[in-house]
Image (cartoon, rainbow, N blue to C red):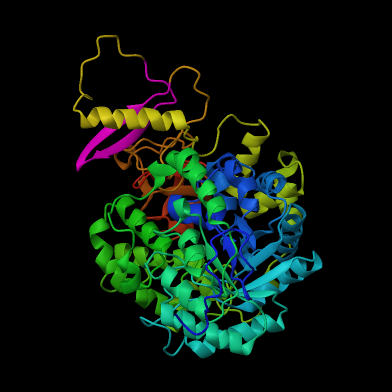
């Protein structure tokens, strides 16, 4: 035991004497926990059974919002993100709420204008947010200025993050060394941070680096230091313990059903490890066990189909080898799988550090992890021996222009020049705070969405997510029956599935029914069932008093394969290339969603002119006319999900 942590009492009781410097804990189960383990698909109704009990634990804060929740809720869960805050607040009355705020990116994937950022923070505070954990993907704190003003104005807690990243296997090197982090902490102090978070989004921080880093920061500032890490690499619990020994004030954990794998350290072992020391949390382990039990029995079964069980190992040593965040890695794998190019993953790993270096050694966190990741995949798939960066995404162009902020090292000038050739905002990159050049956008959004929005929260939803936000609002207010996203799974569904698996194991799945086979209803869902190395594809069609809530494959929008069961909300993909006559088809090089067409039928285009914007893995790609000619047909509409090779336009 370090001299920093002393044993003071062995009393197991919950009313044991308070520790001299109790460790504070923030729970992440209701946000980053399910974001990490099952793609942010956790529903509010599944948080309520434990909400009141979690309020009794004594957490410093409970993370309830932000990150990907806002996107996922309206896109896939038929839930209004604002409503979750208000509902949870009714049950969690004592413990402050915290959210992950992507600074000027808010809860989206680009920098928004100041008027929208200000309105968002004001509405979040008004709806119940207390702690604003704020980060910028580039650690460019000019992107904090507007939101911090709003957080302070609302009288809320501003937690400033330093995104933890590395270019070497361990802390150090030319870019991300101890001095880098100390300077960032000082900058946060100058901005009036109420606490400082080391945000290790990829689970890269090694125990002794955590110790040295926390020690260095504690020596430089009086501001409380908070450590956030992920379990992905297997180091997080060790790193937390070393950080505790170094005097960290607050750490992040999950209740154990939501912990480990790509999620976070489990709270229970940490509470036990510190019991009776001067850092004792004072938490009642039996209260935690009660929460654990409910989650394990009533909640987690509904999500087990979303858990990645493709490998036995709980930890992912690829993170240690490639320093890629777990979420980013699974995105890359999905993207390659959709393109039938999974065999090229090693090329992607080789290309990734090159792209990252070209793009200024940016930290890999949302959205930069996607920006670097998708560009890397594009390079591997579309580059030719004599041309690199053949298909540059709109987001890489924005990054090269300076729209995300200042990168840690300068962007490769050749790549920058190529990316900005013909770029709409201009070919010379900016050096000012990115939002300085953004026109106010709230009023414009308000006009566009019109009476589909009923209040300011709706307008903000639309402003941040114009395509999916509009779809959601139209559904929410009954303007369309076209329900967005996936239907939930009930415990009965789970029981039926388990019964099927048992049947499959007993070899009884193939029995010939002695009754007529019923018609398949629209609620039918296909499950892939893996039993002891064998594989069954099973259609499940709920019967009886089934409520119209069911489940669909996890990737409704960009990823649905044409051959697999398409998500219910997805429109049919366009006709295959072979079906087109009288012109040259422009086909989708990857599966995705149509954002908009840039031309109209009848327009004259030259080969290379942009025709349509296709969103794939949340990145926008301009697809260009393959030949000179007239636009004969535009085969899809904005918001349509399309498969790889779908015809998007015909030029003749
Ligand atoms: Co995280």
Whether residue 451 is in magenta: the answer is no
Residue in the foreground of this view, choosing between 95 and 185:
95
Q: Is residue 151 above or below residue 29?
A: below
Q: Which residue is drawn at 22% across and 38% down?
A: 535
- Relative image position of residue 202 (x, y in whole percent): 44, 68
74 sits left or right of 561 in the view: right
| Residue 508 image point, x, y percent | 21, 24
Write down the region rendered in magenta.
519-542
Q: Is residue 599 visible?
A: no
Instruction: Indicate whether 553 appears above or below 2.
Output: above
Total residue callouts: 0
Point 51% across, 58% down: residue: 254
- In this view, the residue in front, 50 or 581, is 50
Q: Quadrant of the N terminus?
A: bottom left
Q: Percent x, y for residue 587?
A: 37, 49
Asked whether residue 525 is drawn in magenta, I would say yes
Quadrant of res 62: bottom right
Give above or below for 41 relative to 440: above
Q: Where is residue 574 in the image (x, y as percent from the top left)?
A: 40, 39
Q: What residue is rendered at 45% in x and 35% in y?
A: 551
Quarter of the rendering containing residue 79: top right
């Amino acid at each position: 035991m370090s001299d920093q942590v002393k044993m003071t009492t062995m009393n197991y009781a919950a009313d044991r004497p308070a520790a001299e410097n109790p460790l504070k804990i923030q729970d992440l189960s209701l946000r980053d926990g399910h974001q990490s383990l099952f793609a942010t698909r956790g529903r509010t109704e599944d948080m309520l059974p434990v909400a009141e009990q979690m309020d009794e634990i004594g957490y410093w804060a409970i993370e309830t919002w932000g990150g990907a929740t806002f996107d996922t809720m309206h896109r896939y869960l038929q839930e209004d993100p604002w409503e979750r805050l208000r509902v949870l607040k009714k049950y969690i009355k004592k413990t402050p709420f915290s959210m992950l705020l992507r600074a000027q990116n808010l809860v989206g994937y680009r920098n928004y204008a100041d008027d929208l950022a200000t309105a968002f923070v004001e509405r979040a505070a008004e709806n119940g947010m207390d702690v604003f954990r704020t980060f910028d993907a580039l650690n460019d704190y000019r992107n904090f200025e507007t939101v911090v003003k709003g957080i302070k104005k609302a009288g809320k807690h501003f937690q400033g993050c330093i995104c933890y990243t590395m270019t070497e296997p361990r802390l150090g090197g030319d870019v991300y060394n101890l001095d880098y982090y100390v300077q960032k902490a000082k900058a946060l102090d100058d901005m009036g941070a109420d606490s400082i978070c080391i945000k290790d989004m990829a689970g890269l921080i090694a125990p002794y680096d955590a110790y040295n880093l926390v020690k260095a920061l504690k020596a430089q500032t009086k501001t409380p230091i908070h450590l956030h890490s992920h379990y992905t690499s297997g180091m997080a619990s060790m790193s937390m313990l070393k950080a505790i020994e170094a005097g960290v004030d607050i750490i992040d954990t999950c209740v154990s059903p939501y912990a480990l794998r790509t999620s976070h350290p489990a709270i229970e072992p940490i509470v036990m490890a510190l019991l009776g020391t001067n850092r004792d949390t004072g938490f009642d382990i039996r209260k935690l066990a009660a929460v654990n039990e409910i989650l394990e029995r009533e909640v987690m079964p509904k999500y087990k189909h979303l858990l990645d069980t493709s490998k036995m190992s709980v930890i992912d040593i690829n993170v240690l080898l490639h320093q890629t965040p777990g979420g980013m890695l699974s995105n890359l794998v999905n993207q390659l799988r959709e393109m039938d190019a999974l065999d090229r993953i090693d090329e992607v790993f080789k290309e990734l550090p090159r792209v990252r270096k070209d793009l200024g050694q940016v930290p890999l966190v949302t959205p930069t992890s996607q920006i670097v990741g998708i560009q890397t995949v594009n390079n591997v798939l579309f580059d030719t021996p004599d041309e690199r960066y053949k298909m540059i995404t709109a987001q890489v162009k924005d990054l090269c222009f300076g729209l995300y902020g200042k990168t840690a090292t300068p962007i490769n000038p050749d790549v920058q020049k190529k990316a900005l050739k013909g770029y709409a905002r201009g070919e010379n990159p900016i050096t000012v705070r990115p939002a300085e050049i953004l026109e106010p956008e709230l009023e414009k959004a308000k006009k566009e969405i019109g009476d589909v929005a009923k209040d300011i929260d709706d307008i903000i939803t639309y402003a941040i997510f114009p395509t999916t936000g509009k779809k959601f609002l139209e559904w929410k207010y009954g303007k369309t029956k076209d329900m967005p996203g996936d239907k939930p799974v009930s415990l009965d569904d789970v029981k039926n599935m388990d019964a099927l698996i048992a049947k499959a194991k007993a070899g009884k799945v193939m029995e010939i029914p002695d009754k007529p086979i019923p018609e398949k209803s629209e609620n039918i869902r296909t499950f892939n069932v893996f039993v002891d190395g064998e594989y069954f594809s099973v259609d499940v069609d709920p019967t009886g008093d089934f409520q119209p809530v069911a489940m669909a494959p996890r990737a409704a929008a960009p990823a649905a394969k044409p051959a697999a069961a398409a998500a219910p909300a997805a429109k049919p993909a366009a006709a295959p290339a072979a079906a087109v006559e009288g012109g040259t088809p422009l086909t989708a090089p990857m599966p995705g969603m149509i954002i908009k067409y840039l031309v109209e039928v009848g327009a004259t285009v030259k080969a290379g002119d942009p025709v349509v914007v296709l969103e794939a893995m949340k990145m926008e790609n301009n697809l260009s006319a393959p030949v000179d000619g007239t636009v004969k047909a535009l085969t899809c509409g904005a918001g349509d999900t399309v498969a790889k090779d779908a015809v998007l336009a015909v030029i003749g």
